[in-house]
Image (cartoon, grey):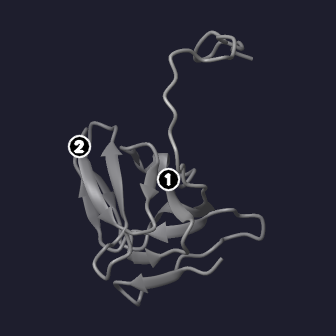
């Protein structure tokens, strides 16, 4: 898979896999940002990305991002293949879960992306009744 990437600040590195076994490319903050206590900030990630047709990009926090005192406010970011204009910079929506302001320094790796393929649903069929047995709801298979 080939990604076309525009950096907004060429002094920061391109997204990269940090280990041979990594499945996601790391992204860093383009600016030093303050995320207010119990608040949200939109942290620019220095890239606009054009992905191949039939693909999308999942944006997730790095495993260590919570150590900064922030988490991704929207859980997982989904970037569609048509979000690829010259000014369509990816952003990390950071929620500060602490009682103090958090400073994210320029160049801090806070997010990761995984390009994925998809099959677009071409037809939706509405039915009155599902043919399968009801399983029981979220968490119905137990806790362990």
The quadrant in which the C terminus is found is top right
Tell me if 83 is positioned left or right of 136 in this view. Answer: left
- Whole-angstrom CA distance, mark 2 to mark 1, is 17 Å
Q: Which mark is residue 122?
A: none
Mark earlier in primary sequence (2, 1): 2
Tell me if 130 is positioned left or right of 10 in this view. Answer: right
- Considering only vertical position in the picture, is 108 above or below 50? above
- Considering only vertical position in the picture, is 137 above or below 105? above
Residue visible at 32% across and 44% down in the picture: 95
Q: What is the quadrant of residue 131 in the picture?
A: top right
Expressed as whole percent of the image width and height from the top left, the position of residue 103 reads 30, 58
Residue visible at 63% across and 9% down in the picture: 136
Q: Residue furthest right?
A: 20
Expressed as whole percent of the image width and height from the top left, the position of residue 76 reads 46, 47
The local secondary structure at tag 2 comes to loop
Residue visible at 50% across and 83% down in the picture: 4
Expressed as whole percent of the image width and height from the top left, the position of residue 56 reads 52, 62
- Considering only vertical position in the picture, is 51 above or below 131? below
The residue wearing badge 2 is 39
The residue wearing badge 1 is 61
């Amino acid at each position: 898979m080939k990604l076309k990437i525009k950096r907004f600040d060429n002094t920061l590195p391109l997204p990269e896999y940090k280990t041979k076994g990594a499945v996601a490319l790391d992204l860093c903050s383009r600016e030093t940002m303050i995320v207010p206590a119990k608040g949200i900030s939109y942290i620019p990630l220095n890239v606009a990305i054009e992905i191949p047709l039939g693909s999308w990009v999942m944006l997730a926090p790095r495993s260590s991002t919570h150590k900064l005192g922030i988490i991704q406010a929207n859980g997982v970011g989904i970037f569609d293949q048509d979000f690829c204009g010259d000014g369509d910079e990816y952003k990390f929506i950071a929620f500060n879960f602490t009682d103090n302001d958090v400073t994210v320094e320029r160049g801090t790796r806070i997010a990761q992306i995984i390009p994925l393929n998809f099959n677009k649903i071409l037809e939706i069929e509405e039915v009155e009744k599902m043919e399968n047995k009801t399983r029981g709801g979220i968490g119905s298979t137990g806790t362990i």
